[in-house]
Structures are given as structure tokens and as C-alpha cells.
Amino acid sequence: MAVAKRCRANVGTRGTPRPCGEPVAPGMLACCASHSRVLISVPRNPGIYYRGNSYVVRWKDRGVTHKQFFAKLDLAREFKGGLDSGKTTRRPLASQTVADYYPEWLDNYRGRTSRGLEESSRREYEISFRRHILPLPIARMRMRDVGARDVRDWLGELERRGCSPTTIRKAKAALAVMFASSVQDGELAANPTAGVRYVPSDKAKRAHPKRTRRKLTAGDVTTILRAMDERWQLFFLVLVQTGVRVSELLGLTWRNVDLGDDPHIFVAEQVYKGERKRVKTDASIAKVPLSTTMAAWLAELRPADGSPDAPVFASAAGTPLIYSNVYHRVLLPALRTSGIAVQVGMDERGREKWDYQGIAFHAFRKACGSLLLAQGRTLKQIQAWLRHSQLTTTLNAYIHETDEGLGTAEIWDGILGDGWGHRGATEHPEKDAINASASAAETSALQGKTRKVRSSREP
């Protein structure tokens, strides 16, 4: 028979407190409304109390007693542990919901590094919140009540709604940045997204298969160039020979083009979504050499009386080119004409559907690194050419194109020299040991026979 729960609210005087002891209704912690407002100690959790349907942590800061309410015991434990270790702010946590906290945070957020926050990143955060966070139940939770399990449930709900793994990762990144800022400002004890890793389910992988992108060879590049108008050939030739990002090429001005004895371009800014701004990283600010042929071609394009701030590749109005226009009006037709794009049928409107093999402007930057690697350049040189801030970026992108396999062990004969590479017998060591033992035995037996013959001949 189940034992009825008893009210544990302390009653009586302050000097002689005693538990109430009255029966408690199922699902309740106290016997009445007045006792439900009384703090009840949680067994084996000093400093944590029940109050109604919440868990309460009490502490003092500069002589003032503070209380913090939590919907779950694990959140209260985490907060209490942070207080005891000094890792958690001693200020009361924010009680706003995710939806209420988000607008003010997004307006005032300036990034967590010295580079600050790009407006394009702010727009991406806004899209992720508007489409994938605010419409879901997690937005109605208080910031301090969100735990790792709630984040995992939210990720699972996004999958069930058909979001791609890439979209889910972007949304998680936006939510993680907001919680990290709240922790940094002392408004939360911990970031609930920090320990949550998103791994797509098999169903999500099948629904959103990873696109296989074609790697451009030197033959592919020349085929694509021949399929386009000559005035566009220089644009794509600069892309593949310098390895610059397309946004950097769109932002290139004649001020940063040197066609003298040391021909080169200086990458210092970019045009991204119509906005001129600084380049992606500090390592991207660098000089990139030009070949003699490329320098001569650019010299022909350079106007005699042009402004140094004019774009090298400009529209008819003299403004920087627009990414989407060049992509749809120049690159895609060239891929179809060259035969690299493959027709895969017709759409519902009777228009041709094409598979462009995942080729976009970045494929020419990748081709630059691949062709340099094929010509014997080291990965360190390619890192400098492509202006990667870290060598690991270059390794991850191009290590699969280096020679695979272990190779043969004969190389050590040349490394250590013939004196060590061809020393001793060439048979297996165990066979040599067996032969040596057999030889010793035969020698011993022969010596024994010799002693017997000698002894028989002695008088």
C-alpha cells in the first residue's frame, strides 16, 4: 500500500519549527495554498527548495537575499553549483522568454570579436529566428528554463518539419550566439546549447542528400571559357588564376591593380550583396601575383582616363557587377553550351531542367588550388596563394588530392643510404634464425664426430 505524502512546510515558531504533516493531494507538494508558498528543503540538495511547482535557489549578495526560480531541478542544481564555484553571476537571472529577449538582443548585439558583426550576419540571424525559432514552443520558454533537452527537442521538431541539416545548423548557431551573449552579460548561468551536438537522422540525410560538386580540371576551365563571350573570358580567367573569391573580384578597383614590373592585384575589400565592405578575414588582405599574359590583358581593358576607384569589372552604368546577373546570364549558359551541364528533364511548366554539377563561382577558386597542387606547389604555398587564415583549411580542402596510400618501403633505402638499406641477408629474420640454429647444430654434430674419429685413432 502506497504511503500518503505529507506536507513538509515548516510551521510553528522560528525557534522550534516542525513539519506540517498534513496529507498532500497527488501531484502537490503542500497541503494548502498558503503552505505552497513556503520554501521546502529539497533532500540532499542544500540551498535548493521547493515552492509550489518550482525549485528555488536562495543566496546572499552584499547583504541582500536573492531567490531564483527554476522549472527543473537540474537547472537549479547547475545554477547552485555555479554560485558555489564562483563561475556564475550572483545577479538574479533574466525571466524573459526567448521571444521577448530576442529583439533587444539582435538590435544591440555587436559580435564577440574585435571584428564586430557584419550586417549580413545580423540578417541571417533574423531569418533563422523568424522562420525556425519564434514559431516553435521553445520561443515561449523563459530563458533561464531552457535546458539541453529542450534544445534537442527543438532540433528534432525542425527535422520533422522538413528543414535541411544546413538550415538547422544555421538556426542552432543563431540560438547559441544569443544564449552565449546572455551568459556573458551575466543574465544566465550557462549556455544550454553548448553541450548539444546536432547529428542529422538517416531520414533527414535521405531527404536532403549532400550534393556532389564537380571538380574543375584545366580542360574543364578552357572548355567553359571557350563557350562564353570574349569579354567575359578575362573575368573568369582572373578567378581561376588568382583564386580570389568572386565577391573580392566584384569589389576590385583599378587602384589595387599594379601592372608594372611586378604585376599583381591587392585584395583589400569586397562587394557582397551590393554592399562594399572589408574582406572576410585579416589574412585575406594580401597581394596576389599576375602572370605576364594576364597583366597584358588587363592593360588592354584599363581605360586611359578612368577613375582609380572604378571597378575593374563594371556594369554598363559603371557600377560593380551583380553576382546573380553574372551567374544566370553568363556562367549557366556557358555550362550548358560547353556540355558540362546535363539536361535531366522538363519541369511542370515545360521548361528544361539542368544539372549544373554543383558548379558556381567558388569552383574556380577550388580549381586554382587543385591546378597549383598538380604543378608541384606545396600546401603551404597554396595556403598563401588562396590567403587561408589557417593551414588546416587548405589541408581539409586539398589533402584528398595528394597521393594516396602508403607507397612502398623501398624509399627508405634511399633515405638512409645503401649501407643501411641493403645490409645483411635479404631473407626473413625468423628464417635466418632457424638457419643459424641448424648450422650451429650441424657444426656441433660434426665437431662431435671429429672428436670420436680422433679418439679412435689414438693408441
Image (spheres, grey):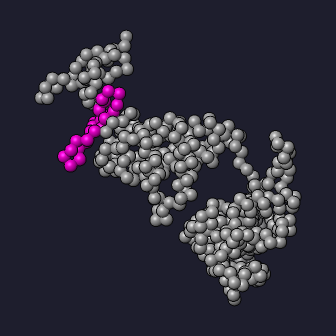
In percent of width and height, residue 251 lies at 64, 70
- 324 drawn magenta: no
Q: Is residue 133 visible?
A: yes
Image point 82% across, 50% down: which residue?
354
Q: Name the residue at the bottom extreme.
A: 261
Is residue 63 inside the magenta stretch? yes
- Name the quadrant of the C terminus: bottom right
Q: Residue at x 40, y 50 (%)?
A: 183
The magenta span reads: 44-67
| Residue 201, visible in the rendered structure | no
In this rendering, is residue 400 above or below 345? below
Q: What percent of the width, then of the height, locates residue 396?
A: 65, 61
Q: In the figure, residue 201 lies in which quadrant?
A: top right
Left or right side of 343 for 252: left
Q: Is residue 214 above or below residue 69?
A: below
Q: Nearer the viewer, residue 23 or 441?
A: 23
Quarter the N terminus occupies: top left
- Is the residue 149 above or below the residue 344 in the image? above
In the rendered image, residue 114, in percent from the top left (x then y), is placed at 46, 65
Judge whether 257 appears above or below 138 on screen: below
Tell me where residue 417 appears, x and y as whole percent.
71, 77
Helix, strand or loop for the magenta stretch, by majority: strand
Image side of residue 265 versus residue 236, left or right: left
Residue at (69, 62) in percent of width and height? 323
Q: Quadrant of residue 421?
A: bottom right
Q: Residue furthest front?
A: 317
